[in-house]
Amino acid sequence: MKKMTTAEKKAITQDWKEVMGTYEIYKPLHLLKRNGPLLTGIYLKPVYGEEHYVPVFHTHSLMTSFPVVSLVAPTSLLNSKGVEESISPLRHSNKFEALVECFRSQCPTAFLDTIACTTLDSIYQTTVAGRDNFPVQAMTDNILLLAWCEKSAMAHERIEHYKSILQGWPEGVTQRVGGAAGWEREVKTLMAPENLENSVAQELKKFKLSHFPDHSLVCD
């Protein structure tokens, strides 16, 4: 076996762009779409020494500064054994339509144009409940989503819930956010409407995505 070539990566990325419709090519093997104050993406994650790839839907909040486009709340295509479905270029060529339909059935949110706040709220809560890799960024993104949609009471209730989770994590994990109390202070600062608006504008400019069409977030 050999690594995917540059030409194969380009073709695979283009194939996914065509079926996903509203996404733009950000980089080879990475599609992005703007939904208001956040990005949704399809990362065609290289695996097995870049011989295969796995489609992964993810989110990235523009409401807080981050050095790279993050893969928050990831949902990977899974096979019948419940593990990531790795796809070779040959299998991509022969079974692409079937693989797309499997991904559509497992992750219908990835195929939406406009996304609702309630949909994303559910995704974030599921990610936090899974506790994989101590998902503090998903916690922060969830609170800022609720703040953006002016769900203040819900946001403050969720802060208390997430604080209780953070307090149960190892100190070595939470110290980078100043512990539960430090995280609360930071997220409450970020929640201010003027801070949310400024962050979105700055992050779009930083990642050179200001030209991306906004497929909107519905604050339902």
Image (cartoon, rainbow, N blue to C red):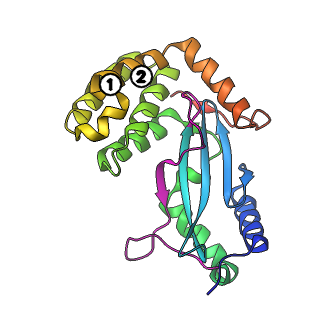
Choose mark 1 or mark 2, whichever is in front.
2
- Mark number for residue 189? none
Would you say residue 81 sits in the magenta stretch?
yes
The percent position of residue 186, horizontal first and vertical second, equals 41, 20
- Asked if labels 2 and 1 touch by Cβ distance under 8 angstroms, the answer is yes
Quadrant in the picture for the N terminus: bottom right
The residue sitting at 37% across, 38% down in the picture is 136
- Callout 2: helix, strand or loop? helix
The percent position of residue 33, horizontal first and vertical second, equals 67, 44
What's the amino acid at mark 2?
Val
The percent position of residue 66, horizontal first and vertical second, equals 56, 35
Q: CA distance from mark 1 to mark 2?
A: 9 Å
Name the residue tied to disc 1.
159
What's the amino acid at mark 1?
Ile
The residue sitting at 61% across, 79% down in the picture is 88
Give the overall secondary structure of the magenta segment.
loop
What segment is highlighted magenta in the picture?
Answer: 61-88
- Estimate how packed mark 2 is, as few (under 14), some (14 to 19) or many (20 or more) residues with alpha carbons within 10 Å: some
In primary-sequence order, the first of circles 1 and 2 is: 1
- Mark number for residue 187? 2
The furthest residue to the left: 168
- Using the rendered view, name the quadrant where residue 4 is placed: bottom right
Asked if residue 99 is positioned above or below residue 163 in the image, the reply reads below
Would you say residue 115 sits in the magenta stretch?
no
Say left or right for 190 vs 13: left
Say left or right for 23 vs 121: right
